[in-house]
């Protein structure tokens, strides 16, 4: 099996509502889709989670497009095999650009699973048929609006609520949500918005309102500050942006800075590394879970397959398609099932179909590469 063509689509989808975090507001998502077609007619798909602006991380749609076109796709055309692990090895010497690498690795995993006639989940070693999920709720225009929004999601069936927080939008909204819903599981995510001086205040309000998990309050490199907050805390400290590879996880574990691991395949360079990090965390008794980047159905499908693996024990940031987009790119769309779960598609490969009509409608640019 060799690569015949690679296509890089740039798509744009409107979000059903703006998503506000400590680093900005997103109203639509512009992203790259990688489509690999083999000489024997198989098609593998991968989504790149880089955003237009370098706010969550330094990668952007433009840097990913450039690295895919000039380095990673040429590397793949030269390769003697389309094995995902072989590709990983071939691009390891290029530093960073993990989201771009992951877009190809996911497409290769889709191909490899199809070649074996199994689902991506089975290919990766996943056994669950349904994965538990929650919802990530952006910063809202007012506290009453937030409480209503959370109420809507609970009514839809989501059981775990993650609130985006930042200085000035933390204690008040968390207190109000806790007062309105005394028994729900509340997580918060600050996307690096606090300075270490805020440690005592965060510890106080998070403990008082029964927050189960505080995600990435401090800067990506601030391992000591996260360890300080974790000391004796009655909630988990989750690292997202800080963990980009095996070394950063090892250092965070040794420092006691991480008691919950968010795995995003884009951030760590692909599902193979993501799986290894979750297994490493499990040996340290640190639970892992799958994070989200507002993916379309292609990226979501990859994430749902990965979430079916044993070490991912906490509910994922993977909501139903209609929480993000009016019309998802895939058929069938993801819908919320019993017990706040999404069903793992049965495959082969991703087990969902890319709608050609909706792809065309969302398409802004496209480039095809041939051997
Ligand atoms: O930090 O988890 C994050 C979305 C974009 C960028 C960063 C994050 C998020 C989310 C959304 O929290 C999770 C989802 O896709 O539902
Ligand atoms: Mg996060």
Image (cartoon, rainbow, N blue to C red):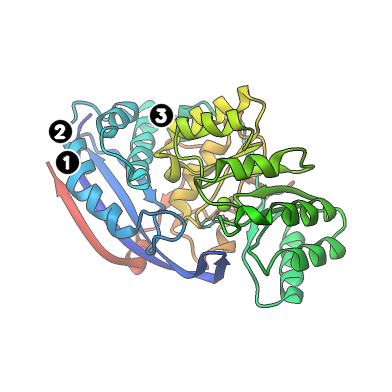
Q: Residue at x 76, y 69 (%)?
A: 147
Q: Residue at x 37, y 51 (%)?
A: 48
User: Could you say where residue 160 lies in the image, as x and y percent from the top left?
Assistant: 72, 51
User: Could you say where residue 145 lies in the image, as x and y percent from the top left?
Assistant: 72, 75
Answer whether residue 234 is visible to the viewer in this image. yes
Q: Nearer the viewer, residue 215 or 262?
A: 215
Say few, some or many: other residues with alpha carbon within 10 Å of mark 1 (under 14 / 14 to 19 / 20 or more).
some
Quarter containing the N terminus: top left
Q: Nearer the viewer, residue 343 or 229?
A: 229
Q: Nearer the viewer, residue 308 or 231?
A: 231
| Residue named by callout 1 | 74
Which of the two discs, 1 and 3, labels the residue nearer the N terminus? 1
Q: Which mark is residue 78?
A: 2
Q: Extreme top residue here?
A: 283
Q: Are marks 1 and 2 in contact (CB under 8 Å)?
A: yes
Report how far apart the C-alphas of labels 3 and 2 lie in the structure: 25 Å
């Amino acid at each position: 099996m060799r690569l015949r063509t690679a296509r890089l689509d740039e798509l744009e989808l409107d979000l059903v509502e703006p998503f506000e975090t400590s680093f900005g507001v997103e109203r639509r998502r512009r992203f790259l889709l990688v489509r690999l077609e083999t000489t024997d007619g198989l098609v593998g798909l991968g989504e790149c989670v880089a955003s237009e602006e370098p706010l969550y991380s330094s990668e952007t749609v433009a840097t990913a497009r450039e690295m895919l076109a000039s380095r990673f796709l040429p590397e793949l055309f030269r390769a003697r095999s389309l094995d995902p692990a072989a590709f990983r090895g071939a691009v390891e010497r290029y530093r960073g650009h993990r989201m771009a690498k992951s877009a190809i690795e996911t497409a290769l995993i889709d191909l490899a699973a199809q070649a074996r006639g199994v689902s991506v989940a089975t290919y990766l070693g996943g056994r669950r048929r349904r994965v538990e999920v929650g919802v990530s709720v952006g910063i809202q225009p007012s506290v009453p609006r937030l409480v209503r929004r959370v109420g809507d999601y609970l009514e839809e069936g989501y059981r775990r609520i993650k609130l985006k927080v930042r200085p000035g939008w933390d204690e008040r909204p968390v207190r109000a949500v806790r007062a309105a819903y005394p028994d729900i599981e509340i997580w918060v995510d600050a996307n690096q918005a606090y300075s270490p001086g805020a440690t005592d205040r965060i510890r106080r309000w998070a403990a008082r309102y029964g927050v189960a998990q505080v995600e990435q309050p401090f800067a990506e490199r601030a391992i000591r500050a996260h360890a300080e907050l974790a000391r004796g805390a009655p909630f988990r400290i989750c690292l997202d942006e800080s963990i980009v590879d095996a070394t950063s996880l090892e250092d965070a574990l040794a420092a006691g800075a991480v008691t919950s691991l968010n795995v995003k395949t884009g951030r760590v360079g692909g599902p193979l590394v993501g799986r290894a990090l979750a297994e490493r965390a499990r040996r340290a008794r640190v639970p892992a879970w799958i994070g989200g980047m507002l993916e379309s159905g292609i990226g979501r499908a990859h994430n749902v397959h990965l979430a079916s693996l044993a070490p991912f024990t906490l509910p994922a940031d993977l909501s139903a398609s209609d929480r993000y987009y009016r019309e998802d790119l895939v058929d069938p769309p993801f819908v919320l099932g019993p017990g706040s779960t999404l069903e793992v598609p049965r495959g082969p490969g991703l087990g969902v179909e890319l709608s050609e009509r909706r792809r065309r409608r969302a398409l802004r640019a496209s480039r095809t590469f041939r051997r």
